[in-house]
Image: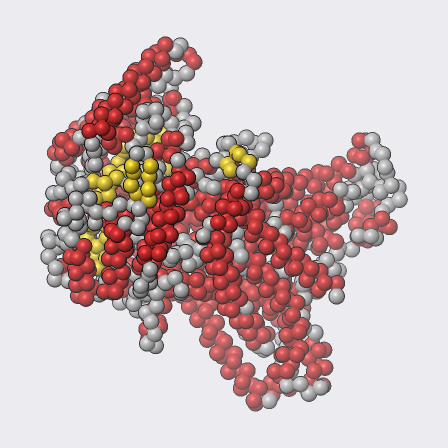
Amino acid sequence: MATDDVVLTKTPRPGSFRVHQRHRTRSPLSWVRGGGLSSLVFALPLLVTFAVFSWGPIVRAVVMSFQKTNLIVSEWVGWDNFQLVFSDPDLPVAIRNTIYFALLALVFGYPVPLVAAVLMSELRRGKGVFSALAYLPVVVPPVVAVLLWKFFYDPTESGVFNTILGWVGLGPYDWLNSSTMAMPSLVLEATWAAAGGTVIIYLAALTSVPPELYDAAEVDGASVWRKVWHVTMPQLRGILLITLILQIIGTAQVFLEPYLFTGGGPEKSTLTVLLLIYQYAFANSLGGNYGMATALSLLLAVFLAVMSLVYFRLTRSWSTS
Amino acid sequence: MTTIDNRGDVNPVPLPGPTTGEPTTTGVPVMTQRADRRRKPSAPQEDRGALSSADWRRPSVKYTWTTLHVVMAVILVLWGLGPIVLLAKFAITPTMDINADPLGWFPNGVAWSNVTAAWNDIQISKYFWNTVVVAAGSWLTQMVVATTGGYVLSVLRPRWAKIINGAVLATLFVPAVVLLVPLYLVILHPPIIGHSMINTYWAVWLPAGASAFNVVLVARFFDSLPREVFEAARVDGAGPFRLFWSIVLPMSKPILGVVSVFAVIASWKDFLWPLLVLRDPDKQPLSVRLPTLAASTDTGVLMAALAISTLIPIAMFLIFQRMFLRGAGLGGAVKG
Amino acid sequence: MRFNRTTALVMAGTMSLGLLAACSSNDDDAATPSGTGSPSGDASSPAADQPVTIEVAGLLPGAEKSAVDALNERITQFEAKYPNITVKSKEYQWLPTTFAADLAGGTLPTVFEVPATDTKTLIANGQLADVDAQVKALPYANDFNPLILKGGEGEDGKVYAVPAKSFYSVALHYNRKLFKDAGLDPNKPPTSWDEVRADAKTIKDKTGKAGYGMMAKDNAGGWQLVAAAYSRGGRVQTESGGTYTATLTDPQVKASLQFLSDLKKDGSLYPDAGLAWDTTNAAFAAGKFAMYTSGSDIYSALVQNNGVTKDNFDYGLTAIPSDSSNPQAGALTGGTYAGVRPDASDAEKDAAVKWIDFWYLAKLSDQDQAVADAKVLADAKPPQAVGTPVLPILSQAKYQESLTWIKDYINVPLDNMKGYTDVMFTQPLIPEAARATQDTYALLFPIVQAAITKDNPDFDSLLDKANKASQAKIDQSK
């Protein structure tokens, strides 16, 4: 951006794109002639949409978290909403469940796509078919996937999964109907629906490993596994870290699966933070507690903002190193 | 895993760093080209992974990896195709059999009536069309905001661009969930328009435009376009509008493709937001409508409805497979 | 209904006051120059003929096509009767998880339905229109069951919500075919919870199907648990001198949970802790379990939404098992009120109450309307339910008279409902808790889920916690 001024045309003329940086005082006319107007016109869609649908609501969220409101009358209540949130016995449950979901999602969804991608990248033909197969579940509309898997998880002996497991003498399992199995069941479906995308990203990253590195390793007499471990993996370190953080950010906001599969049950075993926010705001038929909902969202936001900062630091350092 | 924008997606989409995607003369990031080249069997030497051709000739390596690949193939087929094939089977199986013997081979024949019932009674076609309308509008607003905004921030760069840039970047750190309630209230009582936007598609389209992710992605790409071309155009007397339309946009096709894929997929997946603002069943996309109907619909008919809703995206995927996969990989690939 | 002299007197007083208020407001209208606005409650005034369009709550999502056709037929008849009114029906299902969004979002139809538990709060919040004048002008205004009408009145004694439909007492629904398959006599349904347990076990052993299903998702689970507790003589809330006390630790609540645990041990409980009101109906209609409790009028919904007919499903209805030795035992009762959006204009309110009269109420008091309504439902292909037993919104005598008008059209298996119809007017009826009702249900359903999914849940500690939370909600509500 520093090179900017150098590129600047020395003499602003009609149709020029921006005001000369040295102009301190300007008349509206010179502003228009200097291209200020066209800049503004181009900025308008961004300014309007962000002001109305992003910046405005963010400010409002902060204000609302200190208010008690029924949408008609609002009353300033200080930190009450935060106190209510912290004293809600559901909050620790929801946080625990969300962390559990994130951990399970990592266990299920992190190594498997990596192994698949490494294996696939060594294929000499048919790579296209394989990546298409892996990606296929990603194209299935998420709601369809949840409704279908909900049927697969039928806890009776004639449920799909129970039938299949029955062939090898296992089960029947309770799946969604058990407070211990419900969350892993949710994560299994979520992994099915998302892993293909991760595989493709890893595959793309793998294609960028410079072949010279392998050649060099071979000169040193490295075995196949050493090449995978000492050449491929380090090259993937960056992308692995990034997908990790993005996955944490994503899973912290999980909603669709618990909402559609279990509604947070049984016994709140799949109640996540986002579901709790939704319940504060919308689940009480007689009017939501918007103050508590925004207060909890802000708390979640602080956590996610920290994660995003880490993420940004990483992408920056990665791209500049 | 749906939130009200694409940042909550479990499918990770890393941002390109500021200096990446070094454009070649055609503006296509280097990585994409490599990926393309790898498809061609004529370039085997450049196209290598950890295993060299020499490795492949060694029996121990060959058998181990072939076995691994076969195992992976079996798992992938079960994983990728299994549930979808089952869905297709259920779609034409009588409800009684689906419930009693879900994996049996049509013990009581085929029930095509499921499909006709889903099409006629559930009106899947209508909700599918709604889904398309929602996605198309969201795509359009995102494109308009991201390209014009990126153009201002990266190419025009008025004095105040830095402030705007900061304000846009800052929203990247605010998760979508914070916006849920206040954004809902904006839709209820929007400024200027005065009346509620609930039950109109604008309620989905417009907020979709405020995606900092897209703006940043596009602005970064514009940053990397060669300034000399702009200067040349300027010398030729091209105004800012012509520069935008005839030079910048055509040079940016790859990134516009990526943003489009993200926009459409995000809109396709979105559930919570349309659930809140599209209360009228006649306007709802599939993602909102199907769960409502699930409870009261006969299992066989529901399965047919689910299958129909899946058919079109899968068909689109198979046709535009290359674009999908490249789009999905590009987020990671441009990063390298 | 629990009813004592004092409440009766208070009620009579309130009602006459309400009538007076109605009269005076009519007088006011008459005094208003007709140019300033459309007078309400006076059908003969010229302003009433102005064209007006209202949106009304229609059928549940996913209703069978024949039910939709029947509704459209009735709308056509209504519009023929009142040419100035256009009616648009909108699919409608009251769910605690979406109602708030509709309420806040202003997307409710002009005429919408709310359960008895919510009317008082909605009235207090100003979220229902005052339709007192219009309702009092109805020919049968004085025939309403006063207790039921009171549920729709505000503190000011005016009518804001009109008793409309589905006044039920919770009853036991059973699949007669599964009873037969298990070698049980379908004409002798269980009359005690012990018999329910024994029959459920027999059915599981003989047919492989679950014997009993229980709603457990969201507030519906709490609602049915309370109904079970009532039938054993328990209560979840008591009132004394205007102070409300949560009593979730009532031993009968625990006994109701223990009953589910016992069934689970027997293997006869349908293993799904995710059943909501509608999915329970669907699973029952699909023959997945033999018995469940829900409102006595559920048969209509089974026909309307789950494709049940007299021929394809052998349905049985009987009273909820009740502990006759306990004078406190009874059947939980509730119902659905129709309300009008608070921002409705006078003309819309007039039209709305005309629709409420036409769609929900006239068939209860007017022979022609009763026959017209029954005919449309019975002629639908496949026919919709006519004659499903409900509790009378007007008097019992009127209800029984109305059944004679439509006897040619009645198509529900009344013979298989005798277990309920024989006692429906004599069983003790107990209304839902008065304070923080939905909140209390929301606290209870996770415990129901524990009973369904866990082997030995600690009900005492779970109920103790829920009781404290329920008390807190009660204290907040006033």
Residue C344, percent from left and from top:
40, 26
The answer to whether residue C384 of the structure is visible from this angle is no
Work out which residue is located at the far bottom of the displayed protein and give it.
B59
Above or below B166: residue C372: above
Residue C68, percent from left and from top:
30, 40
Q: In which quadrant is the C terminus of chain C drawn?
A: top left
Above or below B64: residue C425: above
* Quadrant of the rendered image containing residue B45: bottom right
Residue drawn at x 63%, y 52% as measured from the top left: B173
* Quadrant of the rendered image containing residue B302: bottom left
Residue B291, percent from left and from top:
40, 51
Near-viewer residue (B114 or B208)? B208
Picture colour scheme = secondary structure
Q: Is residue C190 left or right of residue C117?
A: left
Work out which residue is located at the far right of the displayed protein and give it.
A10
Near-viewer residue (A140 or C192)? C192
The answer to whether residue B79 of the structure is visible from this angle is yes
Residue drawn at x 29%, y 17% as measured from the top left: C20
Work out which residue is located at the far front of the displayed protein and give it.
C241
* Quadrant of the rendered image containing residue B57: bottom right
Above or below C77: residue C292: below
Q: In which quadrant is the N terminus of chain C drawn?
A: top left
Near-viewer residue (C436 or C88)? C436
Above or below A111: residue B211: above
Q: Is residue C223 left or right of residue B30?
A: left
Residue A310, percent from left and from top:
65, 59
Residue drawn at x 53%, y 86% as measured from the top left: B63
Residue drawn at x 63%, y 60% as measured from the top left: B14
